[in-house]
Image (spheres, rainbow, N blue to C red):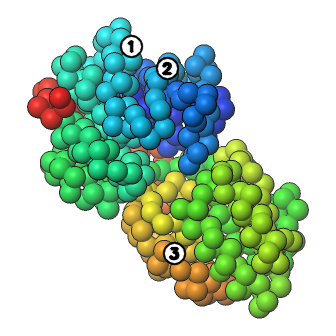
Amino acid sequence: MYRIAVVSSYFPTREQPYRGHTAYQTLRQLRRFAEIEVFAPFAIYPRWLTPRNFPYYRPDVTYCPPDMAAHYFEYPAVPGLSRFLNGWVCSRYLLPYLKKAKPDLILNYCLYPDGYAAVAAGKILNVPVILGAIGSDLCRIPDRATRRLTQKALRGAAAVITVSAELRQRAILLGAAPERVTAILNGCDSSIFRLGDRGAARTGLGLAADAEVILYVGRLDVNKGLREMLAAVARLASGHPRLQLVLVGEGLFEKELQERAGAAGLGGRVRLPGACSSAEVARWMTAADVFCLPSYSEGCPNVLVEALACGRPAVATAVGGIPELVTANCGILVPPRDAEPLADALAAALLRHWDEPAIARQFRRGWDDVAVEADVICRGALSSGRPVLESIR
């Protein structure tokens, strides 16, 4: 078996056990082919200057998730000011771990700063690096400096894996060699996410049997289109007296969501269960009539794969890799940032009779399938020789 060092902060922590869920599930299956050791870097900020645009947690560096050898470490950073240096600083802290691990291959999830650090360390150790783009790292690059450093990382990688064909094109436009970029769609755990009994699920969750339930699962963030979702539900409320909106997840937007729901007269129609386990998410999906994902940008959203595997039709925005998943047989696509067509699509989805067993049969892709495809890329990088080194200085 070959040895992989995984470098990624997109990975579970004690504080956020479902962080990096797709990477973790892939790696659990990839252990069939390789010995895997994870090195998870996290920026540590001064107490007097912490980030404001995302929840900041200092991870418990002694934590190790089940079934995986993992090492957590911190490196110093200043919000915004040190962004262009974070990749280089991270690489300096990462290098001693990799020297000790002696991997045959370095695999990354999240291009900057983690991916840049992986490629920089790979150059020093003469070890090939495979970069994995998860979505936001290609769709929402915050500034020119980060863009330039992301480009350097992509050009220095032996291979690049994206979670959708749309992201593959983005990587190529940023300078990745087309022959080195492969799209591998996400999977899901079919033992958890599968067609189930809607009535039993609703009873367990305290939902009325005749309710019309729209479900969202994910980070409570304005970029997920939640303002438009609330506005769309407000448009439908008078004509759908049994309508319920369930928003599963947590995030900085939660307080504003509650305020907006109350101001729109939706207080009794909106439920916020908070963060849920995979089994709990699957139960909400089973209970729902329609899954809704009105994001402004996406890669290959795993929650969408899971909802479809449960046989639930989706109303989602036509962004990123979503059109690769949602067809006329399983959902309705709408433009982002527009509540009116979103409301129309939700109304149509609630009225339509969907072949839910057929939807579930179409989405049986498991994490073992993802791991098999990733293993092919890893073996190809090992057999093709050393990484491209000229692009990281």
Q: Quadrant of residue 114?
A: top left
User: Compared with residue 307, is residue 315 higher up or lower down, i.e. above or below?
Assistant: below
Three-letter amino acid code of the residue under disc 2: Phe
Ranked by sequence position, the earlier of labels 3 and 1 is: 1
Q: Dot 3, crowdedness within 10 Å: few (<14), some or many (≥20)?
A: some
| In this picture, residue 166 sits left or right of residue 313 | left
Q: Mark 2 = which residue?
A: 73
Three-letter amino acid code of the residue under disc 3: Arg
Q: Secondary structure at mark 1?
A: helix
Q: Dot 1, crowdedness within 10 Å: few (<14), some or many (≥20)?
A: some
Q: Nearer the viewer, residue 195 or 296?
A: 296
Horizontal and vertical percent position of residue 108: 36, 34
| Residue 314 is at least partly visible in this image | no
Identify the mark at residue 97; answer none if there is no mark.
1
Ranked by sequence position, the earlier of labels 3 and 2 is: 2
| Residue 264 is at least partly visible in this image | yes
Q: Residue at 34% x, 18% y: name it.
A: 92
Q: Nearer the viewer, residue 24 or 19?
A: 19
**Label 2 near label 1: C-beta < 8 Å?**
yes
Ranked by sequence position, the earlier of labels 1 and 2 is: 2
Q: Mark 3 = which residue?
A: 337
Q: Residue at 51% x, 75% y: name it.
A: 337
Three-letter amino acid code of the residue under disc 1: Tyr
